[in-house]
Image (cartoon, grey):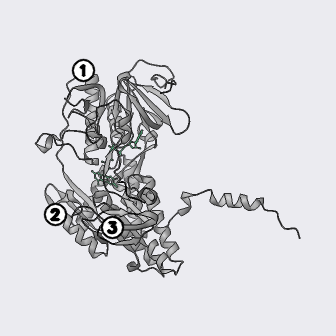
Amino acid sequence: MTAATFPAPSDGMGKTRKVPRILILGGGYVGFYTAMQLRRRLGRREVAIVVVDPRSYMTYQPFLPEAAAGSLEPRHVVAPHRRELRGCTILSGRVTGLDHGKRRAEITPTEGDAYMVSYDHVVVGLGSVARTLPIPGLEENGIGFKQIEEAIALRNQVLNKMDIAASTWESEARRRMLTFTFVGGGFAGIEALAEIEDMARAATRDFDSIRPQDLRFVLIEATPRILPELGDELGGYALEQLRKRGIDIKLSTRLESAVGGHIVCSDGDAFDSDTLVWTAGVKANPVLAETDLPLDQVGRVRALATLQVCTEDGTVVDGAWTAGDCAAIPDLAAGEKGKFCAPTAQHSVRQARHLGDNLARFLAGEALTDYFHKNIGTVASLGLYKGVAQIAGVKFRGPVAWFMHRTYHMWAMPTLNRKIRIVLDWTTALIFRRELVALGSLQSPRQEFVSAAESGKKPVAST
Ligand SMILES: Cc1cc2nc3c(=O)[nH]c(=O)nc-3n(C[C@H](O)[C@H](O)[C@H](O)COP(=O)(O)OP(=O)(O)OC[C@H]3O[C@@H](n4cnc5c(N)ncnc54)[C@H](O)[C@@H]3O)c2cc1C
């Protein structure tokens, strides 16, 4: 670990102050809402709050499928830290080590050497990463669907492939370009697949040489059903709807290889596909292994229902708090011991607010309370005007469920500013159709300039 140390908290006027420093690792749901809640309860003279994240914004992940499908402007589904977390210090970088015994975290900034940040309390909200398998060709050809960058890249990839396929008559190449493979039939995978397929089908209207039936969408799911969180009836309904749209859904099937874009499935089917999206589950952020915090068998931080980190025997680890996808939080609403809260936004937001309250109570010497939340329901979009939902045990499907999905997420999206932008995006898309342009050059913006510079080096023929 390096010697350089981040300065002590200041009062905002340049003077250093002796106030407790709360270091928040990760600025996603947990980091964002914990910081907001703490600032609501405590002023700059009471605590200093430092948030560390390599990204300068919090991503509202449930809107990623709609951002990928062009119904929402990608910048509107993120909430910028510096604008929304007033009174907090934002550090752009990754935590690469944590010595909680010494109350020090190692931060590696996007550029420059790593440095240490000391703290009084740490909040661990490092989220999860894609849970991959050692499948040949997956790492080289696959893309995840957890970040806004991935959603934009996927949208550009699908529309670009359609553009290129429309300009070639080589049937094998066209088939490969127009085959889109998704692995994993949980929420993220099904919503991403359904929205992207909807968008691609709508886009065929603008192509004279690509018909909807030329597109092939394949879903590979290892278990016998999709959307298990919604139960057999609604999961079965979603399956039927997607199959009616011509999506090839392979249940109880595993991806065995993807070398060179050649997809081999465990049911014996094999085909070429330029697009492979991996949404087969998540695991706790592996950087947690670089800390001295107690972790469970699957790498999550152990915690009590008060959201304090604890050891295996339940002893509180002083000054350490956690919540969200990276934490094993007891699910008291489940009514039986040994159950943990699922990795959902619904839990993460509420846990974060609860954590902020408990930490403020702790600093004031008050008693802490347990986190308890009973799932209110689940909503999922299957494309424009299509959806499934289960609220308080009542099942909804079709446009009603789709409308509930939009209404719920608009309500849950942080900040009024973002809510208004999202409603405006939806309204514009309803009037003018969604945005179907691929900005492929975003991935290599300097290419044209480099070509121009190279051509400038060639001798100009004299006349
Ligand atoms: C496509 C998709 C759709 C979803 N839809 C729903 C839904 O409809 N309903 C629902 O309830 N849930 C949904 N979820 C799940 C939900 O988004 C997650 O449960 C929630 O984001 C978890 O919050 P978190 O704060 O634990 O993690 P995150 O929100 O992922 O935040 C983790 C943060 O840590 C940062 N980070 C990572 N590594 C480091 C490091 N080394 N140092 C510093 N910072 C780091 C990341 O940049 C990120 O900002 C969806 C997820 C996805 C991917």
Q: Secondary structure at mark 3?
A: strand
Question: Of callouts 3 and 1, which one flags the residue occurring earlier in the amino acid sequence?
Answer: 3
Q: Quadrant of residue 87?
A: top left
Q: CA distance from mark 3 to mark 1?
A: 58 Å
Quarter of the image where one finds residue 394? bottom left
Q: Earlier in the sequence, mark 3 or mark 2?
A: 2
As measured in the structure, the alpha-carbon distance from the residue carrying label 3 to the one carrying label 2 is: 25 Å
Q: Between residue 80 and residue 159, name the one nearer to us.
A: 159
From the viewer's perspective, tell me whether residue 183 is left or right of residue 398. right
Q: Which of the image's four quarters has the C terminus? A: bottom right
Q: Position of residue 92 (x, y in %)?
A: 48, 38
Measured as percent of width and height from the top left, residue 448 is found at 65, 61
The residue tagged 1 is: 365
Q: Secondary structure at mark 1?
A: loop
Q: At 27% across and 48% down in the image, what residue appears?
A: 344
Looking at the image, is 344 positioned above or below residue 25?
below
Q: Residue at image x 78%, y 62%?
A: 458
Q: CA distance from mark 2 to mark 1?
A: 48 Å
- For the question of whether residue 127 can be seen, the reply is yes
- Report the number of numbered marks: 3
Residue that numbered label 2 is attached to: 232
**In this rendering, which labeled residue sits more in front, label 2 or label 1?**
2
* Amino acid identity at mark 2: Asp
Q: Position of residue 308 (x, y in %)?
A: 25, 30
Q: Crowding near pointer 2: few (<14 within 10 Å), some, many (20+)?
A: few
Q: Is residue 86 visible?
A: no
Which mark's residue is nearer the viewer, 3 or 2? 3
Rendering coords of residue 2 (x, y %): 50, 26
